[in-house]
Amino acid sequence: MLVYPQLPSGALAQLPVQKRHRRRTLVNTAADGSVVKLGDAGAATIEWQLRYAGLSDSELSALLQFVGDAEGTLKGFTFVDPTANLLAWSNDLKNEVWDAAPFLTLTGAIAGPTGGNNAWHAAKSGAAAQSLSQTLTAPGAYTYCLSVYAKASSASTLTMLIGGSRHNVTLGSGWQRFVCSGSGDATAASVTFGIELGAGAAVDVYGLQVEPQLSASVYKASTTGGCYENARLGDDIFSYTTTDVNRHSATVHILYASTL
């Protein structure tokens, strides 16, 4: 499967990014005048407009190569939403999308760092480390940022996982946001993200987030995630403007429809 290129800077897009959801509602009007409405999830589409300015020759070349490989609108590709939290169900750590180790106990409805009761208490039993993770269908060669709010009643170490990379952070008694960046296996079509608790650890966590960039943005609670395996270009023609030596601007239109 083709993969949309990430810029050498580690960014997937430049701001502002325009994103549009389109949804369809089926309406059935009966003979007696009553109306039944039903959302048609299968007809939903998402569109992105990615506007680039100041592209270098090498960055423009990567986009041109990608458009050629995709043959315009013909071929599908993997697109990672630059505006989204790539993790699904980030506020529901017991959802089936999460892979929780067998000796990890999760308790919800804990007071979080930004108000509300969306945080979780995670505790482990047994001698072996226990992890909580999601494996995303996302390019292994991308640079990603993983972030989480965490605290512990006593000094504890939490390990943040990006593919095979491990980043240890020391927790205090107050909420702190921890951020790390890294890549997966460059040849892989998926990456595992998560956290790991050591022996006897008990921590509170909130706001697990993965983004396709070097640093974290504000936390965005998610349900669907942001990895799309069969996105397509919205145009057959790719136009760009050269504004100076080694400087170019362009707009890329991307479309995702679950029925394609």
Image: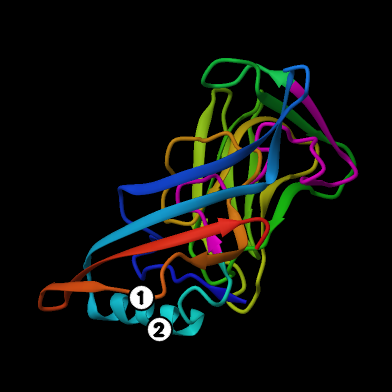
200 vs 86, left or right, is right
Q: Is residue 142 visible?
A: yes
16 vs 122, left or right, is left
Q: Which image quadrant is residue 96 in?
A: top right
Residue bounds of the magenta highlight: 79-108
Q: Is residue 166 visible?
A: no
Instruction: Provide residue 217's location: percent of width, then percent of height.
Output: 42, 41
Q: Residues within 10 Å of mark 2 (few under 14, many from 20)?
A: few
| Front position in the image: 198 or 177 | 177
Q: The C terminus lies in which quarter of the figure?
A: bottom right
Instruction: Provide residue 171's location: percent of width, then percent of height.
Output: 58, 34
51 vs 196, left or right, is left
Q: Which residue does the image show at 53% across and 50% down from the upper left?
A: 46
Q: Which residue does the image show at 66% across and 62% down from the upper left?
A: 137
The amino acid beneath tag 1 is Ile
Q: The N terminus lies in which quarter of the figure?
A: bottom right
Q: Which residue does the image show at 58% across and 68% down from the upper left?
A: 139
Q: Which residue does the image show at 69% across and 31% down from the upper left?
A: 203
What is the magenta segment's predominant secondary structure?
loop
The amino acid beneath tag 2 is Gln
Instruction: Provide residue 60's location: percent of width, then percent of height.
Output: 29, 76
**Residue for badge 1:** 237
* N-term mark: 2 or 1: 2
SS label for mark 2: helix
Q: Which mark is residue 65?
A: 2
